[in-house]
Image (cartoon, rainbow, N blue to C red):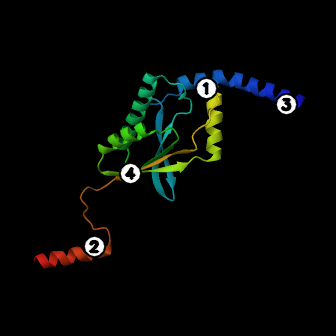
Amino acid sequence: MTGLLIFTAAFSLLLALLRPGTLILSRFSRRTGRGFYTVETTHKGKHWRTMHLTSYDPVGRLSRIQAVRFHQCYLAALENALRGFREPLYFRSHLMRPVHLRSMEKCLAAFPERRWRKKRVRISRTEHWGIRLQTLFNEWRWITPQDRGYLIVIGPPGTGGRSKPKSDSERIHERIRSDRSK
């Protein structure tokens, strides 16, 4: 029983000591895009960009105005990433709601050269606990994140009008069509 009391006291002390540190870090860790940043990753020799929410930005208990600003920052960061980088972009989020998906689709409509898709994915147990503990340390509240989220994959800019057909069979058919027109 005393072990449990010691653990509880030590954990409470740890939380009390970490809270001022996370507040200080949150003030100085703001990157451009306020709340979001992109990182280049490599997977199987292919370069990708992934978009992340900064670790120290509180996202719980936002007022209506703060939530609108937060979402506008997300759309601005997405647009900057699409304009600034040629690599494909991906991100996963358990925070996406249907209204966010619709506004993201409107934002992506401005980039017709980029193909994209969304997929409903399961949030892993490790990620669940990571989100819970991060929220506990940053915002001092216990949450239960959703079981499912979205994976958004946005491809690199296309070439517009294709100069080469996609496959050998298409090349053959194109050659036959051009011979017939002569």
Which residue is disc 3 drawn over? 4
Which is more toward the observer, 142 or 153?
Answer: 142
Q: Quadrant of residue 126?
A: top right
Instruction: State how far apart marks 3 and 4 are (Cα).
Output: 50 Å
Q: Quadrant of the N terminus?
A: top right
Cβ–Cβ below 8 Å for labels 3 and 4?
A: no
Q: Secondary structure at mark 3?
A: helix
Q: Secondary structure at mark 2?
A: helix
- Between discs 3 and 1, the one toward the N terminus: 3
> Mark 3 Cα within 10 Å, few/some/many (few <14, many 20+)?
few
Identify the residue at image location x=43%, y=22%. Answer: 65
Instruction: Look at label 1 and name its amino acid.
Output: Glu
- Between discs 3 and 4, the one toward the N terminus: 3
Cβ–Cβ below 8 Å for labels 1 and 4?
A: no
Instruction: Look at label 3 and name its amino acid.
Output: Leu
Q: Which mark is residue 116?
A: 4
Q: Which mark is residue 170?
A: 2
- Between discs 2 and 1, the one toward the N terminus: 1
Spot occupied by residue 95 in the image (x, y as percentages of width and height): 50, 38
Spot occupied by residue 45 in the image (x, y as percentages of width and height): 49, 58
Q: Is residue 156 left or right of 96 when viewed as pictured?
A: left
Spot occupied by residue 150 in the image (x, y as percentages of width and height): 49, 46
Identify the residue at image location x=64%, y=20%. Answer: 20
Instruction: State how far apart marks 3 and 1 are (Cα).
Output: 24 Å
Which residue is disc 1 drawn over? 139
Q: Is residue 172 visible?
A: yes
Closer mark to the observer between disc 2 and disc 1: 1
- Between discs 1 and 4, the one toward the N terminus: 4
